[in-house]
Image (tube, coloured by chain):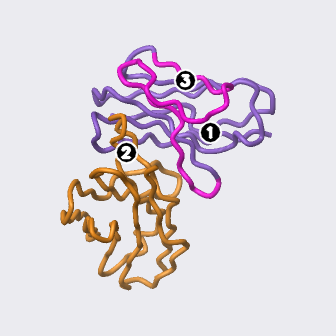
């Protein structure tokens, strides 16, 4: 009964490919996020959706496109992958300004 | 803008040593403050939090006090164990725009040796 689940956990792909990461939360939260963690463990927010509406879009290349079909799901699609996209991507959710609940992360390696 | 600064790591301690990881913040208004822990290969988990000045958050022997006068939220534990080895993140809630997002410090790696 994982609260925030992401798939796949690991993703290895070639430069130029397109890939997606899926996220689902069963906590009933209204808000979901994508964070990127680089090789130095630094966490940076990318996007946030509140009840299917985009509310945060940090400075992220437009090759990254989030999609929220409903408030329990937030998927991340990445076009034309580059070496610098290699990172661990974390999905998270919360209600209002409360505690963030994180998924286990999706490690993307671009070769 | 709002930001969080943590002490540089890695921090290496022997078992049963005293731990302090410093965290200071810059924020407008009155954010909530958090410590998250990330064990190897896992996502982040909330360790403790404090929502207003002088609050003390505590969990699993860890403590941190929200100090508005020094804009700090230092993490402490009296006696660390090998199982505490992890990356620790200090964070604040960015209430601007009421988005609920958290701003994280750069993380501090703790390694505890037997």
Query: Front-most of A62 and A41?
Result: A62
Quarter of the figure with residue A83: top right
Quarter of the figure with residue A93: top left
Tell me, yes or no, whether the highlighted magenta stretch contains residue B89. no
**Chain letter for purple?**
A
**Identity of the residue drawn at 62% across and 50% down:** A38
Q: Where is residue A39 in the image (x, y as percent from the top left)?
A: 65, 54
Q: Specify whether disc 1 shares its chain with disc 2.
A: no
- Is residue A76 depicted above or below B27 in this figure? above
Separation (CA) of disc 1 from disc 2: 30 Å
Q: Where is residue B114 in the image (x, y as percent from the top left)?
A: 46, 82
Report helix, strand or loop for mark 1: strand
Q: Do residues under tags 3 and 2 come within 8 Å of each other at their CB atoms?
A: no
Separation (CA) of disc 3 from disc 2: 21 Å
Badge 3 is on which residue? Answer: A66
Q: Mark 3 lies on which chain?
A: A
Separation (CA) of disc 1 from disc 3: 19 Å
Question: Is residue B72 shown left or right of residue A62?
Answer: left
Badge 1 is on which residue? Answer: A10
Badge 2 is on which residue? Answer: B94
- Identify the colour of chain B in the image: orange
Q: How crowded is mark 2: few (under 14 residues within 10 Å), some or many (20 or more)?
A: many
**Identity of the residue drawn at 62% across and 58% down:** A40
**Identity of the residue drawn at 51% across and 41% down:** A45
Nearest to viewer (mark 1 / mark 3): 3
Question: Is residue B34 shown left or right of residue B82?
Answer: left
Q: Which chain carries label 1?
A: A
Query: Front-most of A19 and A7?
Result: A19
Report helix, strand or loop for mark 3: strand
**Identity of the residue drawn at 43% across and 74% down:** B82
- Give the magenta range: A39-68
Question: Is residue A81 shown left or right of residue A95?
Answer: right
């Amino acid at each position: 009964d994982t609260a925030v689940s992401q798939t796949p956990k690991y993703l290895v792909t070639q430069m130029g490919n397109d890939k997606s990461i899926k996220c689902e939360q069963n906590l009933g939260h209204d808000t979901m996020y994508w964070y990127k963690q680089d090789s130095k463990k630094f966490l940076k927010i990318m996007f946030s959706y509140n009840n299917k509406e985009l509310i945060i879009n940090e400075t992220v290349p437009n090759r990254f496109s989030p999609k929220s079909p409903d408030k329990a799901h937030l998927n991340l699609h990445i076009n034309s992958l580059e070496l610098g996209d290699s990172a661990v991507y974390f999905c998270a959710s919360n209600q209002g300004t409360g505690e963030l609940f994180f998924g286990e992360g999706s490690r993307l390696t671009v070769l | 803008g709002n930001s969080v600064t943590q002490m540089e790591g890695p921090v290496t301690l022997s078992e049963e040593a005293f731990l302090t990881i410093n965290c200071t913040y810059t924020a407008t208004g009155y954010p909530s403050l958090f410590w998250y822990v990330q064990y190897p290969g896992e996502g982040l988990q909330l360790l403790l939090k404090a929502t207003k000045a002088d609050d003390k958050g505590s969990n699993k022997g860890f403590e941190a006090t929200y100090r508005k006068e020094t804009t700090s939220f230092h993490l402490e534990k009296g006696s660390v164990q090998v199982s505490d080895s992890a990356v620790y993140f200090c964070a604040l809630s960015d209430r601007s725009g009421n988005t609920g997002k958290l701003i994280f410090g750069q993380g501090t790696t703790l390694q505890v040796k037997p």
